[in-house]
Image (cartoon, grey):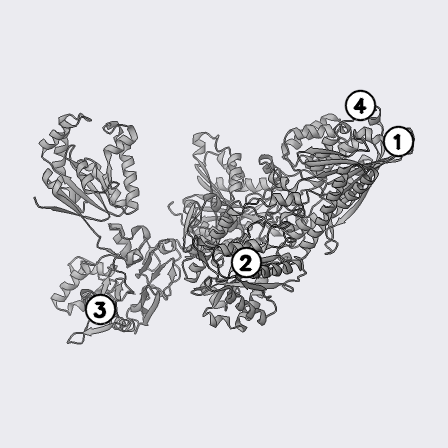
């Protein structure tokens, strides 16, 4: 017997139909994958321990529908193995398919009744009365004819066991599935009969026009490898709809273009088919123009428009083109509502004051990975909204005709030659007042809340727990800057491994050894500044600030702390500081060199007392005052008592211990006082920049630290607001270099410095086991008093403190570093705000994980 | 932590060294006591007929302090556990050590010389670093009525930086006092002056206070403040102690002026280790400037908070709303009132603070509610600066004392989410009226609460509200809350927004 092919779309709901004993389960298990088949009997078993329990039917089908729904939502072909001989049962499944926008397919096993009866009688596990089979068979016969009418898009009937056995399932991609077409593409907005502008645009895009003997354009040959993609609405309103159609149809025939259907093509099909259609919105013009064409051409146009697909999924799923856009759940799906969305958008059913339909701004909520390009709604200038762009720039209304080069994301457009058609709503459309209007930048709670997992380029997936997200939500909502200008949070930094040397907790030797072990050939030791970490967003001018970041009037950037709070108290102070930074960048000619009009800088702002004044008074100075007051009388009393009763050796020991605590307390006071210097407004404030984080289209973590610091030096030269970062480049594996680093660190900390940070010179560095720590801090022994408390160096304390566990801190440092890089790369690439914000938020969330704050 | 007790005597029949008998510690020895709080040392720098000084030095282990149940880190300073004054300042730890090490002396017992405890001695007590909330005046008011000659020397915060005085005092008390009373007074007053305790205050603290206060506390003019602070402002315990003191004497209870408003007290009632909480839903004002008498509310919160709640509840009732979202519900005060009214079929409380929601759930007893009642209410975390689709479909939403806790620059996002996305039929917004601040004795520019990002006058509030109403298709009217002042207006103002064309709940 020859093979019998059963074609099904590769995403669909396959409903098997057949009486008990018709061989459905056997058929399903032979023709489909293990997880693709959902059996109602199995579900009966799941909910009742009995595959034949009829009492469990309702619950069993609940479970079956639930699982099927999950699979279909994920776009997986799913087979329902149940009798499905009753219309009711099938109706539920048809609804399920509709709800998930997949096509329903029926495969009917219409076996001779005797075969079924015989098979049932052989089955020991169930004892159906024969009449059940008879009844099911009757129901089946009544059903077969009507299956298509019920809504099954394909119906395959197998009427013998031999046919069933010999059949083969052939999975076909949907018509909208062009994932194998990888482009590059030139996606062209609504043409509306503007043939001349289209020809000019194609010329500008590098297409070569082919003319017929009458001088009419009948094709355009793309530059090597490219394909044009039209977003629909080729027709109506404009001066030469037939010319546009002739050109585009020719391009498509010759494989030079693709086109999705617009609502105007949809309506034209009906008009050409003789349906009673109102000749409004420019359809009249089209009908008039087509009347001058031969019947043959008209028929061709009707076929062409009729055959247009409503959306295409291209380039492995990375690009979706639909006339009015398409939300993510509809990508690659097929249903009436998917088509309607693609043609008309997310309409609410209302109309605005111009009589035009009110549309829900679906793009604001769009969170998909695929880029969506569309037209339909004329706008003055195309803008990115969450990785979507509307390319209809109203050519026919006197605007322009626009194309987007994909994947280059480059806009190419030509102005309209004239206003061909008066718009019913002004092109400079103000936000419709009656509709649900949302700024595209408003972030959704679902962008940040709950357990999240973020795919990073450099450190794989990073998970944020729901608990950590809950904590960060409060901090971010109540204290942080507006997310539009909070583009990066610096990662935490791990300390050097705990030192084995006596009398210190941290020492350069261990940090250098760690990098030598990771195989890092060169490291840079940078002086650790005695201020507070700050991130500066500096725009070159007010226009850049408002266009790129939506900063309000008078604001040209932001300065924030490592937890996202504004660094300075007032906007005026921030602007004053930014303006000096900007002038220095002007003077050092950084803008042009980096080809950008904004910069994100990583820096330390001094003194620490500027930010931490209250902390220094309330915590540090208070400790010093209490110690300074309590310890001397204690020491005096101990001295007197030890003198009076000399044989009390314990007392002498206690006296010595108290003396040691007193000198520790004095050293503590000295240590914190180094962080206090007077400032008056911005007078006395210093900035030590040490990294350029991002600029327009660029990140800089692949440039060596010497490049970053050289740029910082130019700022120091330009304005004494900036202070340089002292540094030392060396080979961590060289004994001589290590000794030099130790000397350097000892000098630095001996003179009251905080310590140093050791970084791989090359900046972003990967080792055998993935990312290498981007920096290790080696803090000075005296500085650590203000972290570990005045007495930490006393022997009985230090030996216990040395058992500190740095593993969590190191892991957190790497995760936060990778998230930070991810944020920078997303910012530089101009990705949607929610994509940037989720990484920034994740850094804050990871910071709330419990890690010893002294590390 | 250190203090000395010196006894002087000119009478040969009662030498100063009797102090050793009373303290039950021999002057020629040094003794060491391992206590949960650390190691206490007792020794005598001087011991002769005329002068005898006993010293108590408590060494706490700074590392064990952290590993155990040390004080909770202060907001924004995660190193507070490691860098703090506890190893030096005379705090509740020293008081506990005093009570343990000198147990028999505190009890007024002396088995070897039973007649000694009842005799007043010439005592000088020196506490070199006593943290004192409220400053020298409070310390004087505590000790002077007890018959001490009080000598107080302020300790500079940092003499090199010229930062003025710290909260520490060098305290010297001189007087003719019975030793056990002196020790009991120190035991109670050290933590009272510090206004902090290193351990969770449980109900048996009331018994300890009554015992230690015997003979001197009941008649102390600052008794109310002492009881409040000693019991860490825990309302129930304070009431209990006050009643018991009242029953000890005929006098009427002291006036209630110094008492903390309920808002401040209750949170600490429930959560061990917590201090005063600041939540968006509750207007709590605490004197940050170490006002007299400890925590001082800047506005009479009880009455205003209650009236505000009443005004909001009444407006909601009049609106006919059956479903209400309390946005920034804090610890659930409003929800509790609304839940008691069956007209509300669906209540949602959201807050950005997870901790507030936990407290709210406990206060509303969500887990014990009957099913039918529990079905009507839900609490969840959300943020008003993020669009939350779950907030749609409510008849009314309330933002009670919420907006002023948000930076001005985030208000457009809040407005977009509440009025644009959630779009309830009615929105009630209350916020302080800054014009009224002068009535609270606040200087120009001073705000009512440290977390207020702004405080508006009536015009500013109305301008904002009108702008929002126009942008999102609402009408708005304004109401006064609290006693209106002819010039300054009401203490709190409310805007009531109503959707112009009510939409079908989506």
- Residue marked by disc 1: B15
Q: Is residue A134 visible?
A: no
Up the image or down, B313 lies above or below A382; here it is above
Callout 3: SS? helix
CB within 8 Å, label 4 to label 2: no
Farthest residue toward the front?
A735
Q: Nearer the viewer, residue A251 or B433?
A: A251
Image position, residue A743 (x, y; %): 62, 60
Q: Please tell me how crowded label 3 is: few (under 14), some (14-19), or many (20+) other residues with Cα within 10 Å.
A: many
Image position, residue B486 (x, y; %): 63, 50
- Residue marked by disc 3: A244
Q: Nearer the viewer, mark 1 or mark 3?
A: 1
Q: Nearer the viewer, mark 1 or mark 2?
A: 2
Image position, residue B464 (x, y; %): 52, 55
- Residue marked by disc 4: B111
Q: Nearer the viewer, mark 3 or mark 4?
A: 4
Marks 1 and 4, Cα distance to the nearest angstrom? Answer: 18 Å
Marks 4 and 2, Cα distance to the nearest angstrom? Answer: 67 Å
- Residue at 72% x, 36% y is B40
- Residue marked by disc 2: A758
Chain of residue at mark 4: B
- Asked if marks 3 and 4 fall on the same chain, the answer is no
Chain of residue at mark 1: B
- Asked if marks 1 and 2 fall on the same chain, the answer is no
Image position, residue B333 (x, y; %): 54, 38
Callout 2: SS? strand
Marks 3 and 2, Cα distance to the nearest angstrom? Answer: 64 Å
């Amino acid at each position: 017997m020859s093979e019998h092919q059963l074609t099904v779309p590769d995403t669909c709901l396959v409903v098997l139909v057949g009486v008990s004993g018709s061989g459905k389960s056997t058929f399903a298990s032979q023709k489909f994958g293990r997880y693709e088949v959902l059996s109602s009997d199995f579900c009966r078993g799941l909910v009742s321990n009995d595959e034949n329990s009829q009492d469990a039917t309702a619950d069993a089908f609940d479970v079956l529908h639930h699982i099927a729904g999950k699979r279909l939502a994920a776009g997986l072909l799913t087979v329902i193995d149940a009798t499905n001989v009753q219309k009711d049962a099938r109706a539920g499944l048809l609804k399920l398919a509709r709800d998930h926008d997949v096509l329903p397919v029926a495969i009917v096993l219409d076996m001779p009744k005797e075969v079924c009866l015989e098979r049932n009688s052989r089955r020991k596990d169930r004892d159906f009365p024969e009449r059940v089979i008879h009844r099911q068979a009757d129901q089946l016969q009544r059903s077969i004819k009507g299956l298509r009418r019920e809504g099954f898009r394909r119906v395959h009937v197998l009427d013998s066991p031999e046919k069933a056995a010999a059949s083969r399932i052939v999975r076909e991609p949907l018509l909208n599935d062009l994932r194998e077409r990888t482009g590059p593409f030139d996606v062209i907005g609504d043409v509306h009969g503007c043939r001349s502008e289209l020809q000019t645009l194609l010329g500008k895009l590098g297409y070569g026009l082919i003319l017929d003997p009458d001088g009419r354009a009948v094709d355009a040959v793309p530059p090597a490898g490219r394909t044009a993609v039209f977003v629909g609405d080729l027709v109506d309103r404009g001066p030469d709809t037939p010319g546009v159609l002739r050109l585009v149809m020719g391009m498509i025939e010759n494989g030079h273009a693709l086109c999705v259907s617009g609502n105007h093509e949809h309506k034209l099909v009906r008009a050409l088919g003789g349906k009673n259609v109102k000749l409004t919105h420019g359809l009249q013009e089209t009908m008039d123009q087509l009347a001058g064409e031969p019947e043959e051409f008209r028929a061709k146009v009707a076929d062409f428009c009729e055959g247009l697909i409503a959306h295409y999924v291209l380039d492995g799923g990375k690009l979706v083109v639909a006339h009015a856009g398409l939300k993510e759940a509809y990508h690659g799906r097929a249903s009436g509502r998917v088509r309607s969305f693609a043609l008309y958008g997310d309409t609410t059913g209302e109309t605005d004051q111009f009589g035009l339909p009110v549309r829900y701004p679906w793009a604001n909520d769009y969170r998909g990975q695929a880029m969506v390009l569309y037209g339909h709604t004329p706008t003055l200038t195309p803008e990115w909204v969450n990785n979507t762009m509307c390319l209809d720039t109203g050519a026919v209304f006197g605007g322009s005709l626009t194309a987007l080069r994909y994947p280059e994301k480059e806009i190419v457009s030509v102005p309209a030659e004239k206003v061909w058609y008066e718009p019913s709503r002004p092109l400079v459309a103000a936000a419709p007042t009656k509709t649900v209007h949302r700024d595209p930048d408003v972030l959704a709670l679902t962008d940040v809340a709950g357990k999240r997992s973020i795919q990073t380029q450099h450190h794989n997936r990073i998970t944020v727990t729901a608990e950590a997200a809950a904590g960060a939500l409060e901090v971010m909502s109540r204290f942080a800057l507006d997310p539009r200008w909070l583009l990066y949070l610096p990662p935490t930094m791990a300390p050097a491994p705990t030192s084995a040397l006596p009398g210190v907790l941290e020492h350069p030797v261990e940090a250098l050894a760690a990098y030598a072990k990771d195989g890092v050939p060169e490291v840079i030791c940078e002086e650790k500044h005695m201020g507070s970490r700050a991130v500066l967003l500096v725009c070159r001018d007010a226009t850049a600030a408002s266009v790129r970041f939506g900063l309000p009037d008078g604001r040209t950037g932001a300065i924030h702390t490592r937890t996202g709070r504004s660094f300075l108290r007032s906007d005026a102070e921030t602007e004053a500081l930014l303006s000096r930074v900007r002038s220095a960048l002007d003077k050092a000619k950084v803008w042009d060199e980096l080809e950008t009009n904004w910069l994100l800088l990583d820096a330390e702002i001094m003194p620490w007392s500027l930010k931490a004044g209250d902390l220094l008074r309330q915590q540090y100075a208070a400790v010093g005052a209490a110690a300074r007051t309590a310890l001397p009388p204690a020491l005096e009393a101990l001295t007197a008592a030890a003198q009076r009763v000399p044989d009390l050796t314990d007392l002498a020991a206690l006296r010595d211990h108290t003396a040691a605590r007193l000198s520790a307390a004095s050293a503590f006071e000295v240590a914190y006082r180094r962080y206090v210097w007077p400032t008056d407004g911005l007078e006395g404030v210093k900035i030590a920049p040490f990294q350029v984080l991002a600029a327009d289209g660029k990140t800089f973590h692949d440039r060596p630290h010497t490049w970053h610091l050289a740029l910082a030096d130019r700022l120091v030269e330009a304005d004494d607001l900036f202070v340089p970062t002292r540094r030392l480049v060396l080979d961590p594996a060289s004994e001589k270099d290590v000794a030099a680093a130790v000397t350097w660190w000892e000098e630095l900390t001996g003179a009251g410095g905080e310590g140093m940070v050791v970084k791989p010179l090359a900046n972003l560095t990967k080792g055998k086991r993935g990312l290498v720590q981007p920096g290790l801090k080696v803090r000075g022994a005296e500085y650590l008093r203000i972290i570990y408390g005045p007495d930490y160096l006393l022997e009985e304390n230090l030996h216990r403190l040395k058992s500190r566990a740095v593993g969590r801190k190191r892991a957190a440092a790497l995760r936060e570093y990778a998230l930070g890089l991810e944020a920078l790369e997303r910012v530089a690439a101009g990705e949607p705000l929610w994509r940037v914000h989720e990484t920034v938020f994740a850094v804050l969330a990871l910071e709330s994980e419990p890690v010893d704050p002294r590390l | 932590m250190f203090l000395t007790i010196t006894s002087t005597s000119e009478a040969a029949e009662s030498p100063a060294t009797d102090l050793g008998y009373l303290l039950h510690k021999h002057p020629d020895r040094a003794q060491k006591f391992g206590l949960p709080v650390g190691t206490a040392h007792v020794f005598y720098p001087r011991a002769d007929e005329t002068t005898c000084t006993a010293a108590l030095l408590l060494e706490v282990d700074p590392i064990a302090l952290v590993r155990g149940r040390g004080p909770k880190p202060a907001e924004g300073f995660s190193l507070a556990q490691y860098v703090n004054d506890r190893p030096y300042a005379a705090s509740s730890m020293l008081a506990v050590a005093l009570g343990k090490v000198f147990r028999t002396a505190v009890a007024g017992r002396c088995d070897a010389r039973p007649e000694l405890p009842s005799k007043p001695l010439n005592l000088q007590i020196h506490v070199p670093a006593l943290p004192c909330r409220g400053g020298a005046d409070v310390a004087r008011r505590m000790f002077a009525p007890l018959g001490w000659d009080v000598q107080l020397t302020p300790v500079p915060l940092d003499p090199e930086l010229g930062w003025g005085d710290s909260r520490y005092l060098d305290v010297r008390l001189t007087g003719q006092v019975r030793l056990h009373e002196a020790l009991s007074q120190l035991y109670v007053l050290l933590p009272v002056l510090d206004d902090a305790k290193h351990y969770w205050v449980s109900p048996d603290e009331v018994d300890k206070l009554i015992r230690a206060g015997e003979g001197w506390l009941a008649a102390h003019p600052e008794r109310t403040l002492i009881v409040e602070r000693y019991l860490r402002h825990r309302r129930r315990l304070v009431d209990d102690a006050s009643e018991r003191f009242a029953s000890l004497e005929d006098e009427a209870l002291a006036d209630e002026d110094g008492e903390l408003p309920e808002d401040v007290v209750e949170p600490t009632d429930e959560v061990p280790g917590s201090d005063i909480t600041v939540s968006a839903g509750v207007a709590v004002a605490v004197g940050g400037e170490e006002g007299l008498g400890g925590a001082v509310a800047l506005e009479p919160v009880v009455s205003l908070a209650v009236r505000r709640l009443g005004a909001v509840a009444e407006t909601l009732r009049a609106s006919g709303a059956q479903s209400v979202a309390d946005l920034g519900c804090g610890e659930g005060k409003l929800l509790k009132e609304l839940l008691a009214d069956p007209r509300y079929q669906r209540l949602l409380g959201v807050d950005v603070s997870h901790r507030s929601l936990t407290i709210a759930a406990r206060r509303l007893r969500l887990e014990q509610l009957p099913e039918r009642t529990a079905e009507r209410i839900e609490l969840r975390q959300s943020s008003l600066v993020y669009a939350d689709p779950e907030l749609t479909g409510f008849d009314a939403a309330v933002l009670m004392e919420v907006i002023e806790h948000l930076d001005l620059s985030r208000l457009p996002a809040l407005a977009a989410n509440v009025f644009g996305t959630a779009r309830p039929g009615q929105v009630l917004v209350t916020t302080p009226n800054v014009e009224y601040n002068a009535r609270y004795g606040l200087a120009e520019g001073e705000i009512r609460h440290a977390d207020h990002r702004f405080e508006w006058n009536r015009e500013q509030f109305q301008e904002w509200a009108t702008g929002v109403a126009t942008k999102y298709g609402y009408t708005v009217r304004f109401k006064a809350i609290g006693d209106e002042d002819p010039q300054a207006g009401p203490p709190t103002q409310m805007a009531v927004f109503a959707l112009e064309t009510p939409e079908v709940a989506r």
